[in-house]
Image (cartoon, rainbow, N blue to C red):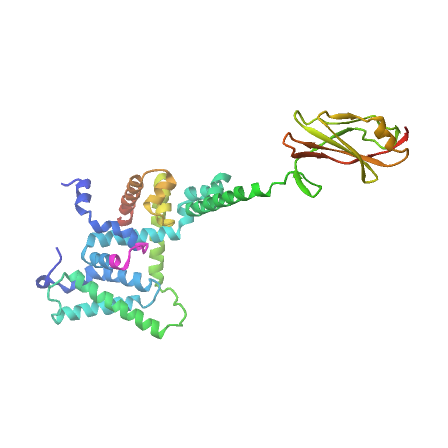
Amino acid sequence: MKSNREESTMRHCMFEDFIDDYLFKRLDETQGDAFEEHYFNCPQCFEKMAERDELITVIKAKRSEIFRDVYAPEATSRSWLESVFAFFTPRQWAMAAVSAALILIVALGVIPNLKTKAPEFFINEDLVRGSSITLISPVIDNLKQIPSEFRWQSLGENIEYKLFIYDNGDLLWSTTTEDNFIILSEEVKKLMATGQKYSWQVKAFSAEGTLIAVSSRVQFNFASK
Amino acid sequence: MEKRKSDLNTEEIVDKYRPIVSFRVKKSIGAHTPDWEDVVNEIMVNVLEKLKKGEFRGESSIGTFIYTITSRRIIDYIRQKSKVLKHAPESNPYLSPQDQIEDKERAEWIAKAIEKLKPKYKEVLYLYYYQELSREEVAKRLNITSRRVSERVNYAQKLLRKVMKS
């Protein structure tokens, strides 16, 4: 007597592999016709196909009873990560990844151009970029006496500073120094009057003579000489 | 080997081919179409008439001969239907009460058999037959090889075949 294995091997037909695809309508017209003609001639294939068809009909009709323990947990106890992954098909995920990469590339290309520009100053019709100079003294209004010393923050070595003193907006006096302070001479003091509004400003130049920094203009007045 | 012209027996032909013709007709025009049985009867009558007239000369197998007649009749039926009943409402499913009860009981029986399978076979059947995923997709979903999927599907079918035949 033949064993079951021998029997099933002998009965295996190459068209058997078409059964599921035929029932799920996955075969093209030529394959479908060929398979239909075949099962009119092959009782074994027809028998298996009829059984398979009945099985699929039952599975489709009674899914909720049959697969209670198989598909229910999948639907109810999915982790949030699985739910996120299940939200798109692998193909949709690939599309989303490509889109995200494109957006990133565009953003990285554009954002640097949107950076805030460096401080700009209009001085004597020239556009200058650079940092500001912090004035140290005098920075308060209503001084008791005429200031003897003007001091500002140092910007390092090989810097030339130009100090300007304005009388009501008009340049009264200016001087140049490599220090970050200046002692006002008696001659200059004589140019200034009690109760008058003055202002001062410092500009810094590099060794090549390029303007690199400008301070704000600070007002001051004094009660006595 | 398929029977040739010399050894054809009418009863045998009807017994053997009627289920096959019925299957093909139901698949083509829908099992819920009340006409399917009439179409099958017409085909079988046509087959027997042609055999009687000697139109089957044994150039092909009898199976191919009947397949050809079946396919032509189905095409005619679909053409005729689409002309006459293009806008007609869908027919109600027709089954005799006895058939309905038998079908229902058999379906319950098969469902119980599937339910008793081990989860590893059931999950494969669910993905492969219910969700209609390919073997490769099932393999990916369950993190096993396609070969293992085929083995599980085949083994589950083998177990269920015993139940369905008994």
**Which residues are drawn in magenta?**
A23-32
Choose between A105 and A85: the one closer to the eye. Answer: A105
Q: Is residue A167 left or right of residue B119?
A: right
Q: Is residue B71 left or right of residue A185?
A: left
Q: Position of residue B49 (x, y in %)?
A: 16, 71
Kindly indicate the quadrant of the structure image that contains residue A195: top right
View extreme (left): residue: B6
Residue A37 seen in render: yes
Residue B117 seen in render: no
> Magenta span has A30?
yes
Q: Position of residue A138 (x, y in %)?
A: 81, 29
Choose between A78 and A102: the one closer to the eye. Answer: A102
Q: Position of residue A166 (x, y in %)?
A: 81, 37
Residue under the image location 34 percent in, 67 percent down: B34
Count the labels in the image.
Answer: 0
Q: From the viewer's perspective, is residue A146 above or below residue B85?
A: above
> Magenta span has A191?
no
Query: Which quadrant is the N terminus of chain B positioned in?
Result: bottom left
Residue under the image location 29 percent in, 51 percent down: A20
Q: Is residue B9 left or right of residue A168?
A: left
Kindly indicate the quadrant of the structure image that contains residue B31: bottom left
Residue under the image location 68 percent in, 34 percent down: A213
View extreme (front): residue: A187
View extreme (bottom): residue: B84
Q: Position of residue B130 (x, y in %)?
A: 37, 49
